[in-house]
């Protein structure tokens, strides 16, 4: 079985080459692009399983690139950036990225996150491919099909990223239970919680609310239990 194909998008060749060495050592197939415009063109005719993406690039930056990709595709995207402020990370995740790492980064940590994202994508693909009776979670007007990964609110389909779907499914399957940001992070990302995980989970929760709630400031489905975490009420 062939390993997954990963696209590295960064305007610094040294960084692209470094990441490629580590990925190829794990057996992955690797492609490179030096900016978002070149990467979009490549995506038109090449199937990609995961993207490692710099934010600050000429021609087409990583944020704009991610927004355009998310209109059509849902492969995992890991952002890299020299910007280290929390708001920069929140902005990056808000565009549809699944994970965010600050430069300089540890290549081994990047590989661990690549593997984590690919495992999640594989689980989703397997679930969608198994011809079994649909497993649909219904909460008022919210419908979550765990086989096809379709989400509908009032009959209208809502498009979630893989990470957003996993968080929503976790909360929906455990209605009434409060999950801390740490617990959500470790369950969904399947790796040890790290210091900035709170912001990562918070941003994804906010994006889910924007998509499924009529009023994201007064959520009907995902409730915040202040000082504790999040839950979907029974």
Image: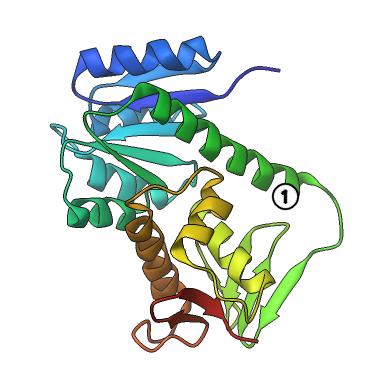
Picture layout, residue 49 above or below residue 151: above
The coloring applied to the image is rainbow
In the rendered image, which quarter is residue 150 located in?
bottom right
Quadrant holding the C terminus: bottom right
Q: Is residue 161 visible?
A: no
Picture layout, residue 106 above or below residue 219: above
Q: What residue lies at 65% left-to-right and 70% top-to-bottom? A: 144
Picture layout, residue 90 above or below residue 24: below
Given residues 192 and 41, the one toward you in this image is 192
Q: Tell me where residue 88 appears, x and y as whole percent.
A: 19, 51
Tag 1 residue:
128
- In the figure, is residue 163 to the left or right of 176? left
Q: Tell me where residue 142 appears, x and y as whole percent.
A: 60, 80
Quadrant holding the N terminus: top right
Q: Is residue 230 visible?
A: yes
In the rendered image, which quarter is residue 53 located in?
top left
- Looking at the image, which residue sits at the far right? 132
Q: What residue lies at 56% left-to-right and 13% top-to-bottom? A: 27
Q: Residues within 10 Å of mark 1 (few under 14, many from 20)?
A: some
Residue at disc 1, secondary structure:
helix
Given residues 7 and 43, the one toward you in this image is 7
């Amino acid at each position: 079985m062939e390993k997954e194909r990963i696209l590295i998008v960064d305007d610094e060749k040294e960084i692209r080459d470094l990441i490629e060495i580590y990925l190829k050592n794990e057996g992955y197939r690797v492609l490179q692009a030096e900016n978002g415009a070149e990467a979009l063109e490549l995506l038109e005719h090449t199937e990609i399983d995961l993207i490692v993406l710099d934010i600050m690039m000429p021609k087409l930056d990583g944020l704009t690139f991610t927004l355009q990709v998310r209109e059509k595709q849902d492969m995992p995207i890991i952002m890299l950036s020299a910007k280290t402020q929390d708001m920069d990370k929140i902005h990056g995740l808000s565009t549809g990225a699944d994970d965010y790492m600050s430069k300089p980064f540890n290549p081994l940590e990047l590989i661990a996150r690549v593997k984590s994202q690919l495992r999640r994508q594989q689980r989703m693909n397997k679930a969608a491919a198994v011809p079994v009776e649909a497993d649909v979670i219904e909460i008022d007007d919210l419908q979550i099909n765990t086989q096809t990964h379709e989400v509908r609110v009032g009959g209208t389909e809502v498009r979630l990223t893989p990470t957003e779907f996993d968080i929503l499914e976790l909360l929906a399957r455990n209605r009434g239970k409060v999950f801390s940001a740490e617990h959500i992070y470790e369950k969904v990302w399947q790796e040890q919680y790290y210091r900035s995980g709170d912001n990562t989970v918070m941003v994804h929760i906010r994006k889910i609310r924007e998509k499924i709630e009529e009023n994201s400031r007064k959520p009907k489905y995902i409730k915040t239990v202040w000082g504790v975490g999040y839950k979907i009420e029974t």
